[in-house]
Amino acid sequence: DADVTQTPRNRITKTGKRIMLECSQTKGHDRMYWYRQDPGLGLQLIYYSFDVKDINKGEISDGYSVSRQAQAKFSLSLESAIPNQTALYFCATSDTSGSTDTQYFGPGTRLTVL
Amino acid sequence: RKEVEQDPGPFNVPEGATVAFNCTYSNSASQSFFWYRQDCRKEPKLLMSVYSSGNEDGRFTAQLNRASQYISLLIRDSKLSDSATYLCAVPALKAAGNKLTFGGGTRVLVKP
């Protein structure tokens, strides 16, 4: 089984709809991240969470919200989706116990907003 | 200047050849650097971490040049399966904890 899972894997929705993307991990990591990737561009950080009670905005948080329901779960919501939120969304996790900053990514959710 | 910059490519490489490309970064205090490989429409996967002057793993070598603030990735004896986008990641300038800033990626196409 994959260590970091995302649901749904693909979603097509209409402008103005509320969308929730979910991420779960079995790695036991305390830190979780949400990124978006646009074609030909790098990963942009939306939100990150260092533990259940710690939520932080990333570079591009406007139009998004998150919830850390448990150490293993981190969901991303688009309250009112707009077409320029069409992108590939990745969840990632990292661990504070080691010296590395290595992040491990989920398989991604491809979101299309019409 | 962007925090992390990469030549987007594509680098067209004959099979068996060597290819190298760089990633420049702004945060002179960075102590760790990462190369991720991303296949089309898939998640990035860690290829290599760099904590000192460099790292080598089989056909892949990463080298760090702190004076000029760049890291390079060299692929020897390129295989068709090396075709991918290679993302560079560096701790963010205002980082607390494990935040990384990613470059836009360098696309490599290995051809027969």
Image (cartoon, coloured by chain):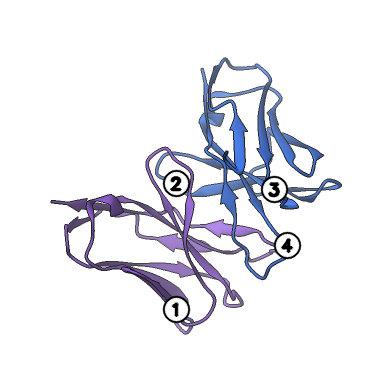
Chain colours: A blue, B purple
Mark pair 2, 1: CA separation: 26 Å
Please tell me how crowded label 1 is: few (under 14), some (14-19), or many (20+) other residues with Cα within 10 Å.
Answer: some
Which chain letter goes with mark 2? A
Q: Chain under label 1?
A: B
Amino acid type indicated by mark 3: Met
Residue picked out by circle 4? A96
Q: Nearer the viewer, residue A52 or A85?
A: A52
A29 versus B70 height, above or below:
above
Locate the N terminus of chain A and report the quarter of the image it occupies.
top right
Amino acid carrying label 4: it is Thr
Q: Position of residue A44 (x, y in %)?
A: 56, 47
Tell me whether marks 2 and 3 sit on the same chain: yes
Chain ID of residue with mark 4? A
Question: Which quadrant would residue A68 be assigned to in this image?
Answer: top right
Residue A76, by quadrant, is top right
Residue A77, image x, y percentages: 70, 29
Numbered circle sitting on residue A41:
2
Q: Nearer the viewer, mark 2 or mark 4?
A: 4
Residue at 67% of width from left, 49% of height from top?
A27
**SS class of the residue under badge 2?**
loop
Mark 2 / mark 3, whichever is N-terminal: 3
Label 3, on which residue?
A32
